[in-house]
Amino acid sequence: MSIAAKANALWEYANPRKFLATSERVMPFFWITSIACIVVGLIWGFFFTPDDYKQGSTVKIIYLHVPAALMAINCWLMMLATSLVWLVRRHHVSALAARAAAPIGIVMTLIALATGAIWGQPMWGTWWAWDPRLTSFLILFLFYLGYVALWEAIEDPDTAADLTSVLCLVGSVFALLSRYAVNFWNQGLHQGASVMRAAAVTGADTEEKVSNIYFYPLLLCMIGFVLLFIALVLYRTGTEIRARRIKALLARERVNG
Amino acid sequence: MIALLLRDLKLALRAGGGFGLGLAFFLIVTVLVPFSVGPQSSLLSTIAPGILWLGALLACLLSLDRLLALDWEDGSLDLLATAPLPLESVVTIKALAHWLTTGLPLVLAAPFLGVLLNLPVPGFSWLVISLLIGTPAMSVIGTFGAALTVGLKRGGLLLSLLVLPLYVPTLIFGAEVARRGAMGMETQTPLLMLAGITAATIALLPFASAAVLRINLR
Amino acid sequence: MIPDLGKYADTVMWSYVVSIALLVALIVFSVMRGRKVRAEMEKVEQRMTRNG
Amino acid sequence: MTLTVTDLAITRGGIPVLEGLSFTLPAGKALILRGPNGIGKTTLLRTLAGLQPPLQGRIEGAEDQIAYASHSDGLKPTLTVVENLNFWASVFGTQGIQPALDAFALNDLADRHAGNLSAGQKRRLGLARMLVTGRPIWMLDEPTVSLDQNAVKMFADAVRTHLGQGGSALIATHIDLGLDGEVLDVGPNKAKPKPIDDFDGGFL
């Protein structure tokens, strides 16, 4: 199959009916593997990894914190991509997928913030420090809230899709800008945070001794979160498609009185 | 274009136009701060740049929902959209009018309110410079938010929620310039960033605002 | 059974409890809404096929 | 300047409302739009004015030719009659609001604030606004609402003068204005719903 034909075949899934049929078929795989990965990863991490020499048992929090933070960002990237697809190709499924993903992003951001704050309590001696990374996630959380609120506020579904897509585009630029601004405003004060970052980015041995012992269960959790995200997006997009169809059917009923 | 600007200025200045609303709010915030944090002048002079920037930002935020809503309600936007004037210019002019009636008065009032908060002497010029450069960005970003929410019945709260994170970079760099200036530190880096943000938003954001307005007019 | 978490036991346990609770809530809400919407769509579709 | 519409289909809120619409509006003629409430007359006018894209079909001769008046007048209550008109005249790049003041007998009200006018007077000012745009094709949505008989006559005269000068008008109204032109009943063009088994069609 040529690349063009492959690309065309991909667009086929923009058809709502085809999307529903296919997602119904593949969803069980994602549900099962994702939950299996997360359960195994968490049990492995929680019960069978040693405490860190510096952070003690709090190192176990990375198995939740890092994957959630990863998905909080990836979710926004996915929304950005689907928003662009909607604006350029006007596939309804794409816009609805972005809408379906946003609440998942909110929950992921919340988990990252909550675990960060709980972890910060013994480490920094305070629940909340205006650490650049935590602050960036707080701003991301606000973007998510605004995005979801805008979807909810607009009645006409196509208008809502258009406006939220533009917001997502503009918001992405400003989110990057905020990230830079926040770093400038408060140059990273907390060594501890870099353990988590190093684990997330390289996953390999670093000066801060994030060793392979922690890495494998963490990787498993990250894969699990990615798969769980896919399963949730597929499921929720299906829900959004049906909700949209109900709306269209009811409107049709009204028009034909 | 000039006609639109003049009309907006005239409307703002006449009765019920909302001119002075932001200014009054700015005054209220700054006057109330010493009552809530205490009268120690050392504390006040430390937080003065931040408070003044925050007050200006909130005053700006307060006046945003009138920016396009009135023209939307009375159908002026419909007619403007079919006029020979491109919508990109319309939103730019609207932002400019908003800045002239809200941002500029805030810039001019800020030094006087700075006196109330014991702003250190070197801080005055930096405060005015940072606000002068930063407030246009707030007007342009606010116009984008207003264009997003213009068709909604209770868009005010949503508008604030949407604009809030967009204001963060401007606030950080703007307040940083004022803070460093007040402490006699180097201000070049944040000042350049602030100017960069303002220039980029003025150059690019009107296209997004116009696109969003077109969608809302459908 | 539960490993010795030392002085950070509360921290670790709370992190897990909060995170897992949030995840489960997300899944449960998604599935609940999904079921409701699916049933409603079938209802509306049936009504409309009947009425033409 | 002829407006030609071919096989036009339009949507409101994503739902098709009118389809298969074809007509021409030659210079010097008026076209009266008829049809029950909610059929999509306003949507049609907005589509022709370029405020929203059509679902399908072609619109020719509309670009930068249309002055559109919606239900609301676009007037600022704190500006005077003359200021309101001058503003729109300069936005549309035309001069001289005097003909508009004359046509709708607004000379006596020239320095009154628009907010102090009666509903009918406001409506007249709103229609005078059409005149100052200098655009040949007028699109008027229920222009005679809240006008008394005298004002309706005044309005009809203004439209007639406009037609006489080579302009044209598309008017959605329920009353007879006695203008030279045809009546277009859009009732038969009501969009037929797609079968609901067609998931994608029913989705739109």
Image: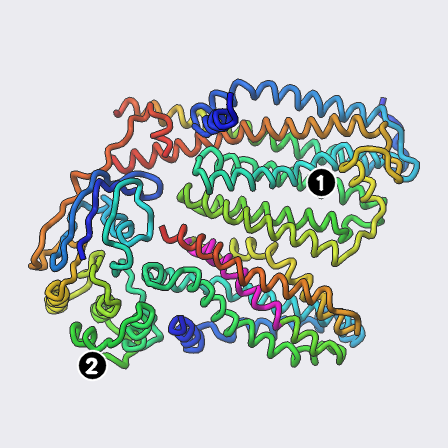
How far across and how far down the image is residue B8, in percent? Answer: 42, 72
Q: Is C9 covered by the magenta stretch? A: no
Relative placement, left or right, of B66 versus A114 is left
Relative placement, left or right, of D189 versus A237 is left
Instruction: Kindly identify the residue that appears in the image at 49 percent across and 35 percent down.
Output: A94
| The quarter of the displayed image where residue D141 is located | bottom left
Q: Is residue A132 above or below residue C6?
A: below
* Cα–Cα span, label 2 and label 1: 69 Å
Q: Secondary structure at mark 2?
A: helix
| The quarter of the displayed image where residue B13 is located | bottom left
Q: Which residue is mark 2?
A: D108
Amino acid type for the residue under numbered disc 1: Ala
Instruction: Kindly identify the residue that appears in the image at 39 percent across and 24 percent down.
Output: C42
**Mark 2 Cα shell of 10 Å, populated few (<14), some (14-19), many (≥20):** few
Q: Which residue is mark 1?
A: A112
How far across and how far down the image is residue A51, in percent? Answer: 89, 32
Q: Is residue B153 above or below residue B132?
A: above
**Tag of residue D164:** none
How far across and how far down the image is residue A140, in percent? Answer: 64, 47
How far across and how far down the image is residue B190, in percent? Answer: 71, 64
Q: Secondary structure at mark 1?
A: helix
Relative placement, left or right, of D25 versus D65 is left
Q: Is B134 covered by the magenta stretch? A: yes
Chain bearing mark 1: A
Closer-to-camera residue (A67/B59): A67
Asked whether residue D149 appears in the rendered view, the answer is no
Q: Which residues are magenta?
A: B132-151
